[in-house]
Image (spheres, rainbow, N blue to C red):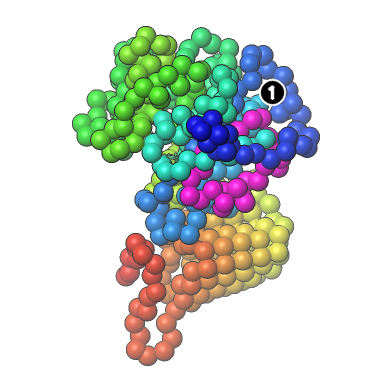
Amino acid sequence: MEGARRASRYWSGPAAAGRPGRSVQAADRRRGPPVKGLILSGGHGTRLRPLTFTRAKQLIPVANKPVLFYAIEALRAAAIREIGIVVGNTRDEIQAAVGDGRRWDVRVTYIEQPEPLGLAHAVKLAEDYIRGEPFVVYLGDNLLRDGVRDVVDAFRDGAADACILLTPVRTPQAFGVAVLEGDRVVRLVEKPRDPPSDLALVGVYLFHEAIFEAVNAIRPSWRGELEITDAIQYLLDHGRRVEARRVTGWWKDTGRPEDILEANALILEAIEPAVRGQVDERSHLSGRVVVAEGAVVEESVVRGPAVIGEGSRIVRAYVGPFTAVGPRVHIEGSEVERCVVLEGSAIVGLEARLQDSLIGTGVQVVRCHGRPRAFKLVLGDQARVEVL
Ligand code: DAU
């Protein structure tokens, strides 16, 4: 019975096709056993409501690309070609966006998690899929500037049972936290009220199969989840070798709206400028600006880093730094800066600048013309509006 249930939890597309680029081929020839990837893409995304009422949080675009795609690309750049994606109630949407992985020259297998019972629970469900190989767990809402290639190579060639990535943060109580003695990890604690250090666990973990003994032995935490942090603590308690590495470059957990805006700004900073759409001679672009195919910029100023998505129309407007305008957005007679505006929305005739805002799909923010002059709002549950 259990065997039958397990078998039906996994499904995947055909073997990956396509030709990898030359640098990827070179990376594929690295020594050591093949490493699998395991992206955790279940969960409820409650902190990103209302956006997550209608989409998986891992599919929210950052610089016009779903967060989850960055995770797949990071694993592929580390020469990983077998990727399991743990999915929950947004599985259809995630599967529709990612498919069988051939776009990245990887083979994706979906692993169903009926309820989000914790990161260690998700790892437990993947045991048959991993089949004794070393693997990288990558949280589907995390972004790392420098990817995971170096850590995967070091882990593959090393002798540790697990490797965690750490970085100092200002709010350690929001993360798993590690205590080190020299370079040695001595204690881990999940979201401590009184943090014993400021070193947060980044959402990338490398494991050998010893982790399965741990995830099967631990008990749910006070919040009812099987915590990966507790599973790694179990490894420490049982004399296993847990290595810690500090991340180089920035790291972002995109769990909250302000994190999405910040991640968007960080990614845009390194974007390659390209103008494929139409920009009229009365418009002015400066800095790193992408104008995608079919986009039109008229009588406007776009100050990068910024990206204007396919088929969008920017008319007599100002688009300021760190803004990602999604596909088919209409911005007219308005100013936006440090915003993420998703597909099909309209921002028209605003008197004040729209700033630091996350605008969902098909949203209209427009000037009120008739009388009485008033704010007229149709807001989804848990929306947030700050007015002048
Ligand atoms: O981002 C780093 C932090 O991630 C670590 O510092 C913490 O130690 C770790 O517990 C985790 O904390 P979060 O509260 O941020 O985890 P979250 O619930 O946001 O889940 C992370 C990803 O895993 C997200 O893409 C959803 C997915 N997930 C989550 C749960 C609870 C699953 O696939 N299944 C689950 O059961």
Is residue 124 magenta-colored?
no
Q: Which residues are magenta?
A: 81-106
Queried on whether the Cβ of the residue with tag 1 lies below 8 angstroms from ligand 1, the answer reads: no
Is residue 92 magenta-colored?
yes
Write down the residue under mark 1: 27
Q: Is residue 275 above or below residue 248?
A: below
Q: Residue at x 41, y 30 (%)?
A: 120
Quadrant assignment for the C terminus: bottom left
Which amino acid type corresponds to the residue marked 1 in the rendered image?
A: Ala
* 14 left or right, relative to 160: right
Which residue is nearer to you in this view: 251 or 189?
189
> Counting other residues with Cα less than 10 Å from the Cα at mark 1, is it few (<14), some (14-19), or many (20 or more)?
some
Question: Residue extending furthest bottom?
Answer: 371
Q: Position of residue 185 (x, y in %)?
A: 35, 16
Q: Residue at x 32, y 13 (%)?
A: 237
Question: Residue extending furthest right?
Answer: 19
Q: Determine whether the residue tagged by mark 1 lies in a helix, strand or loop.
A: helix
